[in-house]
Image (cartoon, helix red, strand yellow):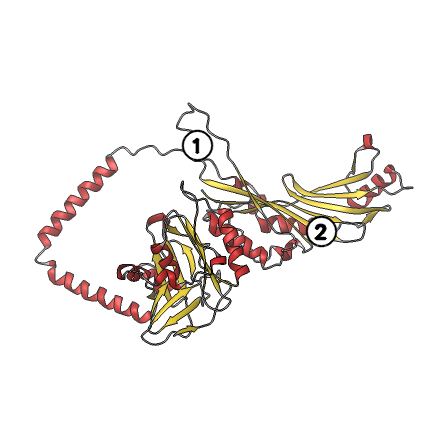
Amino acid sequence: MMKRLKPVLFRPTSRRERTPGYLLADGKTGWVAGIRWVQGGVATGLTRYRQADSFCIAAGKGTGQVSGLVSPQDVRRGMTLYSLAMAFLLAIGGSSYGIYRLDGDRWVFLATVRGRLSVMGDITGSLNDVLMARNQFLEFNEPDDAGWHCAAEPEQAVSWQALVRDLPRVHLRQARLRSTSPARLLQVAAGVVVLGLLALWLQDASSRRARQAAAEAAWRAQQAVEAPQPETQAQLPHPWADRMTVPALLSQCRVSRAPLRMAVEGWPLTAWECTASPAGLRLNYAATPGVTVEAFARQVRVLYGRPAAFNLKDGAQGGEVFFPFETTAPAAWLRDELPGPADTRLMTLLSDLQRRDIRHSPVSFSEVTPPETAPGTKSDVPVQTWREYTFSVTTPLRPELLLAGVDDTGLRLSSIGFTRSTQGQSTYTIKGSLYVQK
């Protein structure tokens, strides 16, 4: 008898928060969907015992390894838990995705890329939720040469049980969730102590072999140091290291626009823009009949202490005033951090913005394609180790509210703009780039 337990629609992003997941129980067996998947081996070795979640699982090896973390509720004593996403990987694999019915009106979106689990998969929720997850996954991932394989469409209403019905025992062992309980850590520590005592007991009998092995290891280490190291190819410098960080641009923009006037000599302020390059604030005023350009320029000099700029050839329909950002420590504006994986950072930034309800103006990303290397170019040309995505967001929210709490790793803003319509409606436009690992 299948039992429906508590669902989750959104997975947490903090390592210290728990991910409840979605548990489907069948006797002493439980299949868990909605696991939070992260890059790296946080679910392997002793590292898994430092996690906030109560169960974990690892998939893949090396740089392609991902770890799953989850804390399902209402787990009965003696129940063995398995990952539904791992069952999908083992049963389908390749570059595939599918939408499966869980129970009632709950669905799950599962996905793999080139035989590896995607951190953008294993999303549970309503049909609209998983369709949105599928669309985002297809937008930011590329399949292998064979293209995408769709294992289950929502119109087919394929049950999740189709993935686990004939799963062999060897695959069940790979899909099993492991406990992160501290009690297990104590067992591991006790085992380490026993092994240490055993090693001490065997030390006398093996001292000669140990000395020989140590001498050989020292010789090999010396040979490795003396051997000429292969030359590594130079890398291009990081462009984000020379661009203002998000907090720096927000702070400078807020301080610079504090003294601005909504009108000068009858000319109303229609727009302003803070830019990272050149670093400063630009004000735009619209000309008003009856007020001369000279009068406006004179009043700007009195109020702001700066000159106004006009396009006199077009009749001076408006005037501009530019304020460069002022600081005694421009180096504090900069940071050269390590960018994160592409799908993880894109999904995190999208989620952060969606929490501010930007549905009226959804954000889209465009990848900046680097110039191709000409045939016959020398191999010592520096390599680019990152990818850049540009984006633009239009919103009625002030930038400080929209970007509050956003993870700005690899995120840089090029401009923050403000416009006011003739009806008095205010709109902000934010443009920038997201740098991720290649």
Image quarter hosting the C terminus:
top left
Residue at the limit of the structure toward the bottom, as seen here: 77
Q: Is residue 312 left or right of residue 180?
A: right
Q: In this view, does 418 lie to the left or right of 42?
A: right
Residue 382 marker: 1
Depth check: give the residue in front, 388 or 213: 388
Residue 428 marker: none
Q: Is residue 103 left or right of residue 291?
A: left
* Percent x, y of residue 362: 61, 52
Residue at the limit of the structure toward the top, as seen here: 376
SS at circle 1? loop
Q: Which amino acid lies under the numbered mark 1 shown in the image of this protein? A: Pro
Label 2 crowding class (10 Å Cα cut-off): few <14, some 14-19, many 20+?
Answer: some
SS at circle 2? strand
State the residue at coordinates (71%, 48%): 418
* Percent x, y of residue 107: 48, 63
**Structural distance between the alpha carbons of marks 2 and 1:** 42 Å
Q: Is residue 192 left or right of residue 25?
A: left
State the residue at coordinates (12%, 58%): 203
Cβ–Cβ under 8 Å for marks 2 and 1: no
* Percent x, y of residue 295: 87, 40
**For the image shown, how many numbered marks are present on the structure?**
2
Image quarter hosting the N terminus:
bottom left
Q: Circle 2 sits on which residue? A: 427
Depth check: give the residue in front, 87 or 200: 87
Q: Which amino acid lies under the numbered mark 2 shown in the image of this protein? A: Thr
State the residue at coordinates (41%, 50%): 96
* Percent x, y of residue 421: 78, 49
Residue 155's place in the image compared with 340, above or below, is: below
Residue 107's place in the image compared with 230, above or below, is: below
